Image: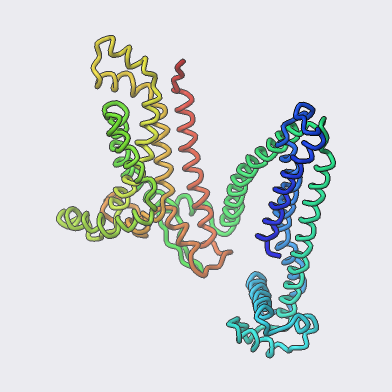
Amino acid sequence: MTIGLLAALVLVLAIGGFILGRMRALKSAKGDLRKLHSLPGYYGQTVALFTAVPAFLLMALWLLAQPALIEARVTQMLPASELPEGANIGLVMSDVRRIAEGLDLVIARGRLSEDDIATMRADLSDIRSRMADVGVALGSNVKPVVFQAAKEYRTLNTLAHTGMVIAVLAIALAGFGFAMLRIRPEFRARNVSESFVKVLLIGASLVAIATTVGIVLSLVFETVHFFQLYPAADFFFSLTWNPKFGGGSDLGIWPLIWGTLYVSLIALAVAVPVGLFAAIYLAEYASKKVRAIAKPLLEVLAGIPTIVYGLFALITVGPMLRDYFAQPLGIGSSSSSVMTAGLVMGIMIIPFVSSLSDDIINAVPQSLRDGSYGLGATQSETIKQVIMPAALPGIVGAILLAASRAIGETMIVVLGAGAAAKLSVNPFEAMTTVTVKIVSQLTGDTEFASPETLVAFALGLTLFVFTLVLNIIALIIVRKYREQYE
């Protein structure tokens, strides 16, 4: 039974529990709803929750724990003395999983029987030929101990999956029966149902918190590992970025920080004026008809995939800047430049500034406007001297949110700014950012334990700290200068 089918079966039981629970509640009250503590639907919800929630929790925990436990068991069957010299246990386990999947496929195609796997009557060459018949490649250098581990891996997976199906169905049926037996007219079904939902909401919140903590801890642990292999002083104070897989790398972060800040500043120089002026027009000057058309069209920019913006930078903006500005002025000859990426990224983040600023300006009480007009101020004076100061904290928060978005952008920089890590003030030269180098250091067949690969986690932690600081600054500004109106 597949995972999807098992989940569907549990859902069917839960739906049936809802219907039967509701019917049992009505029957226990002999059709008189006044005798029931709660509405009939709450009794059905109680049965459905006791049926589905424990079963799905068990399934989730089982699926999380099963691979680790099985791999730990199978790894014990792979003594180093019987493996190829210098073999990596992680790569060997990859072969074990691949062979186990191949065995499943060969059995499914009828090329091999369960008895052949169980008794090993078929030798390795025979099994290899049968697997090749269905397109599963088994290398000639596979050792018998690896094949034996694959057989054990497959057996344990099958047993664990069967056990999970039995356990999940058993706990679903147990929850179903337990909830049905509790249904009586005086049973406080609404309280139980609402408490269950409250626990689920708390659990969802804890999942979000745990995910954040897990991301941070994973970055911290791998960054510590990186600094054990590479001097922290060279990472933070070197002005050269020149990774060389195999040793002798210069992994100074400052060229990447400079490129990130440079591209982000150009993007903000484009997005902030355009977005802010658009927000002021839409909130204060535009008619309802114009606003109803212009605001959705402006927000369409936020829905365009970043890869499309990157292609626009590569094909249109980059060549235009090179042909009409960089080459005639003698300050650049490449279509990939900081200016290209900055301009296109600025267009992309305009909705972040305009939409949020528009909402904030509209939130300013109309009484402030009326008071200003009553004192003889014009509309422009009211906007400059009343509305903008009142909306300033929210606008600053919107700008910092757009800055965080710009700092974390990757695809536009890859296609628009190039991949050259350098310290330069010429905006028509190719540069790169932290996010681009994170991708490049983790792309391809690389040794995960090398500093050239682990540096990606140090870069990621640095980027996380930058965006965190920006968000904290925005929060401080909003709380300090926020105006509250009755």
Q: Nearer the viewer, residue 245 or 266?
A: 266
Residue lying furthest right? 181
Q: Is residue 243 above or below residue 395?
A: below
Q: Is residue 82 above or below residue 317?
A: below
Left or right relative to 441: residue 77: right
Q: Is residue 135 visible?
A: yes
Residue 18 occupies quadrant: top right
Left or right relative to 13: residue 350: left
Left or right relative to 190: residue 457: left
Q: Nearer the viewer, residue 471 or 80?
A: 471
Q: Is residue 38 above or below residue 106?
A: above
Q: How is the image coloured?
A: rainbow
Left or right relative to 383: residue 48: right
Where in the figure is residue 294, as x and y percent of width and height? 30, 38
Q: Is residue 154 above or below residue 459?
A: below
Q: Nearer the viewer, residue 96 or 167?
A: 167
Q: Quadrant of the N terminus?
A: bottom right
Q: Nearer the viewer, residue 345 or 376?
A: 376
Where in the figure is residue 143, as x and y percent of width and height? 70, 83
Q: Is residue 262 visible?
A: no
Residue lying furthest top? 375
Seen at 28% across and 22% down, the residue is 384
Seen at 29% across and 36% down, the residue is 273
Q: Count how many numbered circles sit on residues in the image.
A: 0
Where in the figure is residue 441, as x and y percent of width and height? 48, 62
Where in the figure is residue 145, as x and y percent of width and height? 74, 80
